[in-house]
Amino acid sequence: MTEFRLLETGFLDGFTNMAIDEAVMLGHKLEDAPTVRFYGWKPHAVSIGYFQGIGEEVDLPRAKELGADVVRRITGGGAVFHERELTYSFVCSEASKLVSKNIMESYEKICGAIVKGLDELGVEASFAPLNDIIVSGRKISGSAQTRRNGNVLQHGTLLLEVSVDKMFSLLKVPNEKMKGKIVQDVKQRVTSLEQETGREYSFLDVAEAMRKGFEKAFDAKVILGELSSEEKKLAKKIREKFASREWNFRR
C-alpha cells in the first residue's frame, strides 16, 4: 500500500500558506511520499488567480479595513474568499502515475478524495467538471491545479460555513448595479457543510474525515508527518515573494 505524508499546518496567514504549497511542490522528488496538507487561514483572506488583476477583483481598502490578507496564487481560477473552511493541497510526481496527465481526469481523481471524505461525514457529494464538488446541486468545494518540474500541485477549499454578504463586501463584481442580484444568485449556487447538515464541525474532525477520504480514493495510508528543514527554508524564502507588492500587483 502506498504511503502518503500528511501535513497539518494549522491556521496561517495567506502568504505563508501559499509559500508552503509551492515549496512542497518544488521540493518534491519522485521517491518522496506524495503529500496531503490540510490548513486554515488566519487572518481571513482573499486569494486571486494567477492571471487576475488584484485591483479589478478585490476592494483593497475594504480588505485593509477588515484585516484580510490578499494574495496571488500560482494556480489559475477566480478570486476566493477564505474564512470558515478547510483548505487542502495535494502534491505528487507526474511520473508516479497517481494522477492522469489529462487535467480533467486528474481533477476528478483528486477531488474524489474530498467526495469520499464528505461521505465519511454522511454528506452525499459528487464531482462537477472542471474542478468543483457539489452537494444537492450546489457548490461546496472548488479547486485549482498547476504543474511544475514534473510535479502536480492541486489545492482547494471545502466550505464549513459561508458568508456570501461578507465575501462580496471584499470581492468586486463586473457590474455594481447588478451586485444584489449576483449575491442572491451565489447564495442559491453555493453551500457549506454546516448549511447542508445543520451541524457545526471542528476543523480537526473535518480534516480527519478528509484524511480517510484520501486513503480510500488512492488506496493509500496517510501518515502524519512534518515539513522537512529544506521545505521550511524554501517556504520562508518564497513567502517574501507572496508578500511582495511586485508579485501581487503584477497584472
Image (tube, rainbow, N blue to C red):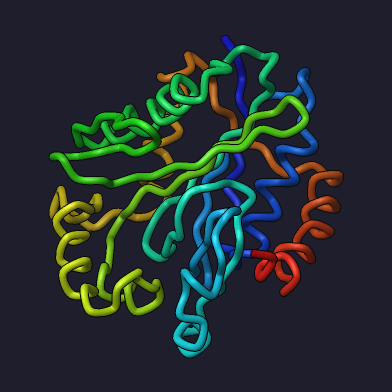
Point 26% across, 68% down: residue: 164
Percent position of residue 183, x then y: 21, 68
Against 167, is 214 above or below?
above
Point 15% across, 40% down: residue: 137
Q: What quarter of the picture does the C terminus occupy?
A: bottom right
Percent position of residue 179, x then y: 24, 74
Point 69% across, 65% down: residue: 250
- Which is nearer the eye, 188 or 14? 188
Q: In which quarter of the image is residue 116?
A: top left
108 lies left or right of 115: right
Q: How many marks?
A: 0
170 lies left or right of 101: left
Percent position of residue 144, x then y: 50, 42
Residue farthest along the top direction in this orientation: 1
Against 60, is 239 above or below?
above
- Which is nearer the eye, 111 or 52? 52
Point 66% across, 19% down: residue: 94
8 lies left or right of 105: right
Percent position of residue 68, x then y: 51, 77
Q: What quarter of the picture does the N terminus occupy?
A: top right
Q: In which quarter of the image is residue 161?
A: bottom left
Against 119, is 238 above or below?
below
